[in-house]
Image: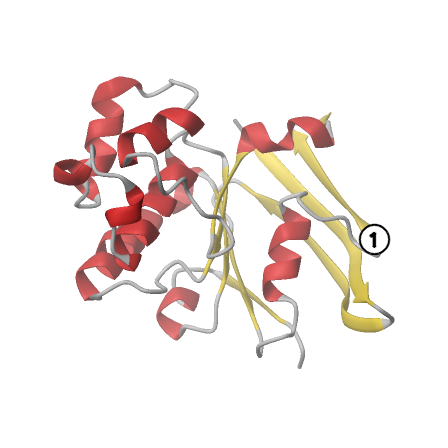
């Protein structure tokens, strides 16, 4: 699906304090954008605004499919998101967490391929309370991508990952970048290089 994101003069304030203003962009399939800036500059906040989880103080974010506007209530059908604020259910197994969010489009074989690709197949029936932080981070990425969304939002995707885990995540981001919109909030230069465009906040 040829999803388009349009952001026009987007700004956000909290308690009278301006985080950012005047963010204008248009993203379509194959575009990749890095949001960077010092801590507190609003990277995660802008990520949430662009994914329609949080309203801006001013400005407008709209989604389109071709020339047709996508209702705000339906945006979640086009979007996947992974970040530290998204916590899978600890009492459920990896497979149960995937089944909870999956809309069934890729089938059981597709789920197994994802689990194998990110080194979690042998742990598929293990409760997340017994996962390491790195394993949970890899599962977050699976949960964000399992429905093959046309837009993916990633907040510091390499956080808590060892080098092997980073290679898994970064390799998948690169392999899928041309088929979707990718937006990453990070100050990691390696993650920034996964993107073709950069927006700097707080500077």
Q: Position of residue 35 (x, y in %)?
A: 56, 65
Q: Is residue 82 above or below residue 33?
A: above
Farthest residue toward the left? 122
Residue drawn at 32 percent across, 21 percent down: 106
Residue drawn at 63 percent across, 51 percent down: 48
Residue drawn at 82 percent across, 74 percent down: 17
Q: Position of residue 187 (x, y in %)?
A: 47, 73
Q: Position of residue 19 (x, y in %)?
A: 74, 71
Residue nearest the viewer, comparing 157 with 131: 131
Mark 1: few, some, or many residues within 10 Å (few <14, many ≥20)? some
Residue bearing the label numbered 1: 59
Residue nearest the viewer, comparing 143 with 47: 143
Farthest residue toward the bottom? 203
User: Residue 178's quadrant in the figure?
Assistant: top left
Q: Is residue 163 left or right of residue 195?
A: left
Q: Position of residue 197 (x, y in %)?
A: 53, 62
User: Residue 127's quadrant in the figure?
Assistant: top left
* Tally of numbered tags: 1
Residue drawn at 41 percent across, 31 percent down: 148
User: Residue 108's quadrant in the figure?
Assistant: top left
Q: Secondary structure at mark 1?
A: strand
Q: Is residue 149 left or right of residue 40?
A: left
Residue 174 shows up from this direction: no
């Amino acid at each position: 699906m040829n999803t388009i994101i349009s952001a026009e003069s987007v700004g956000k304030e909290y308690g009278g304090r301006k985080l950012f203003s005047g963010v204008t962009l248009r993203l379509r399939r194959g575009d990749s954008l890095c949001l960077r800036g010092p801590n507190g500059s609003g990277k995660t906040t802008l990520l949430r605004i662009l994914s329609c989880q949080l309203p801006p103080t001013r400005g407008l974010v709209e989604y389109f499919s071709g020339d047709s506007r996508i209702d705000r209530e339906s945006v979640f059908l086009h979007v996947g998101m992974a970040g530290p604020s998204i916590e899978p259910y600890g009492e459920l197994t990896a497979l149960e967490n995937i089944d909870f969010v999956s809309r069934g489009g890729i089938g059981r074989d597709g789920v197994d391929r994802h689990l194998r690709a990110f080194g979690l197949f042998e742990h598929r029936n293990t409760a997340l309370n017994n996962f390491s932080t790195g394993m949970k981070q890899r599962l977050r990425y699976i949960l964000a991508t399992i429905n093959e969304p046309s837009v993916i939002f990633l907040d510091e995707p390499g956080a808590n990952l060892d080098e092997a885990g980073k290679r898994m995540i970064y390799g998948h981001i690169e392999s899928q970048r041309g088929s979707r919109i990718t937006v990453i909030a990070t100050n990691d230069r390696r993650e920034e290089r996964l993107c073709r465009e950069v927006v700097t906040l707080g500077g």
